[in-house]
Amino acid sequence: MAKKKVTAIIKLQCPAQKATPAPPVGPALGPHGVSAPQFVQQFNEKTKGFEAGLVIPVVITVYQDKSFTFILKTPPAAVLIKKTLGIQTASGVPNKQKVGKLTQAQLTEIAQTKMPDLNANDIEAAKKIIAGTARSMGVEVEK
């Protein structure tokens, strides 16, 4: 069987179980001839295991016959850090104003969650990547 020809790769971030065909989903998929309601229904079905409203990056591959497939990624590190610490926003001036403190146990947990999408060889390298994100958000990281 011949391979389908890929016409576009679209990257979006949608809330788990709460995606709608409204912007940004509809306008991103429309020009490629993909049915936004069909994608939304499949996406919401696939994200049942995630906490409702948690931002999930998704990579949609559109084929020449207007069909599509998509891959779910792990939530962004910043979203996981904010959820773990229970804060709404990161610091506007991260070098002066701190908004929370991340323990080593919390850092390890976030790094293990993000591991499939990070280009780190081991958990220690992943923890360094997450710690850097935390510092840029104004979150102190316990030594």
Image (cartoon, helix red, strand yellow):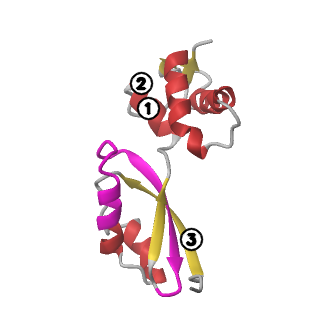
Residue at figure coordinates x 41%, y 48% from the top left: 55
First of labels 1, 3 by sequence position = 3
Callout 3 crowding tier (Cα within 10 Å): few <14, some 14–19, many ≥20: some
Q: Which residue is mark 1?
A: 82
Pick the front one: 22 or 18:
18
Q: What separation in Å lies between label 1 and label 2 (alpha carbons)?
A: 5 Å
Distance from the alpha carbon under mark 1 to that under mark 3:
29 Å
Label 1 amino acid?
Answer: Lys
Of residues 109 and 36, the one drawn nearer to the viewer in this rendering: 109
Q: Secondary structure at mark 1?
A: helix
Q: Is residue 53 above or below residue 1?
A: above
Q: Is residue 21 magenta?
A: no
Tell me where residue 91 appears, x and y as whole percent: 51, 29
Q: Is residue 115 above or below residue 44?
A: above
- Residue 63 within the magenta-colored segment of the rendering: yes
In the rendered structure, the answer to whether residue 100 lies left or right of residue 9 reads left
Q: Amino acid at mark 2?
A: Leu
Residue 9 at x, y percent in the picture: 56, 71
Check disc 2 and report its element: helix, strand or loop.
helix
Which amino acid type is marked by label 3? Answer: Ile
Give the residues in magenta: 41-65
